[in-house]
Image (tube, rainbow, N blue to C red):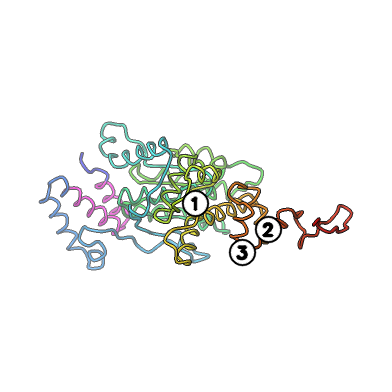
Amino acid sequence: MEHLSEILKILDGALKANASMATNYAGLLADKLEEDGERQQARLIRERLARAPIAIASAQGAGHGVHFGQLPTDNDSRLNTVDITQPLLESTDVLLPDAIQARLMEFIQCVEHHDELQRVGAALANRLLIYGPPGTGKTQTARWIAARLKLPLLTVRCDTLVNSLLGQTSRNLRRVFDYAQQSPCVLFLDEFDALAGARGNERDIGELQRVVIALLQNIDALPDSTILVASTNHEQLLDPAIDRRFAFHIPMPLPDTTLREALWRKKLGAFAPDDLDWSDLAALSSGATGATIEHVSLDAKRTAVLSGQARADTLIVLRRLGLTLALSQGERLSTTEQEIRWLREWAPAHFTIRALASQYDLSLRRVTGIINETPGTRDGNKETHKGKKTRKPQ
């Protein structure tokens, strides 16, 4: 039967006395019928929608657009537990390794052809788990999925769902899942491990176990056609029962050399320096995430604009990159001297004494002195192991 999922959703809305859900899916059904050439049937549905109470018809637009009811909130904090956005495809491009991109497109195709696959018994639940280190593009991928499917993105910060009151977290979950079923959308559970942590460890308490059980029940209650995307930095912490609920798993690794170069080219764009060696930049940024590359590129662009330059300076790009990598490695470079020594050790071929002197507006002699200083000393004085000071050689 064509469009069975929309018909079932309309029935669910009616049974739950959820007018928004029923009218949203009726409007979607009318749109699909019109796309199939059934204009007369689409017109009849829209005429019925137009006769609905003014508030409903206005919100629904007689079959066009999406309307969600009042945002779900946590009773204690009164904070909304869901954010709604409508990502646009042109502003949500993602660069991923080929194999991961192919797997992601497979998920998109399964969503787009769910009814067809369901008719032949080959449909999978539209549930995707994205995992990997911070800054590797998990949230951006969720935005891209919503944009690619032309659906609203309902983002749930899982840590905001957790309430100290017994039972409140489970109620928050129920409200979020009910809310997401009002209209076609992508439900995105960010920081998923905050809710779906493995049960049975030594720190576990009964309430946490009940939260995981409630999460399992809510996921199981979702129709297979509902699009659920979850992301985590710590896949190994997820409860195995939760992990099995997701038909698709997408790892987000740190970008390799080829992907780093592509990211640099995209993020620097027209601001890329004329003399920039892309392969060298890709090699120097080993270990950097996509978020790091974007951050450094934006910094370099801002510096160029504020300096009245049409392009970024290569040394400024490298300097920003080096200092950002230092921070990610736990280095705390609080002084100019520390920065100079770090950059000199990190990329000596680029950060020559002359280049460092230019970057920091110091004399060659001063930069040489800083490089030769023992870390922690200043003004050319070196501290001996006995605490005595010796004069710097002339």
Is residue 56 shown left or right of residue 197? left
Q: Which residue is mark 3?
A: 361
The answer to whether residue 392 is above or below residue 202 is below
Q: Which residues are magenta?
A: 6-33
* Callout 1: SS: helix
Q: Find out whether residue 362 is within the magenta segment.
A: no
Q: Which residue is mark 2?
A: 367
**Label located before the other in sequence (1 or 2):** 1
Q: Which residue is mark 1?
A: 291
The location of residue 269, given as percent across then percent down, is: 40, 53
Residue nearest the observer in this picture, 305 or 29: 305
Tell me which amino acid carries mark 1. Answer: Ala
* Callout 2: SS: helix
From the viewer's perspective, is the residue at label 1 or at label 2 nearer? 2
The location of residue 346, given as percent across then percent down, is: 63, 47
* Callout 3: SS: loop
- Quarter in which the C terminus is drawn: bottom right
Q: Main secondary structure of the magenta part?
A: helix
**Distance between mark 1 and mark 2 Cα atoms:** 32 Å
Q: Residue at x 64, y 63 (%)?
A: 362
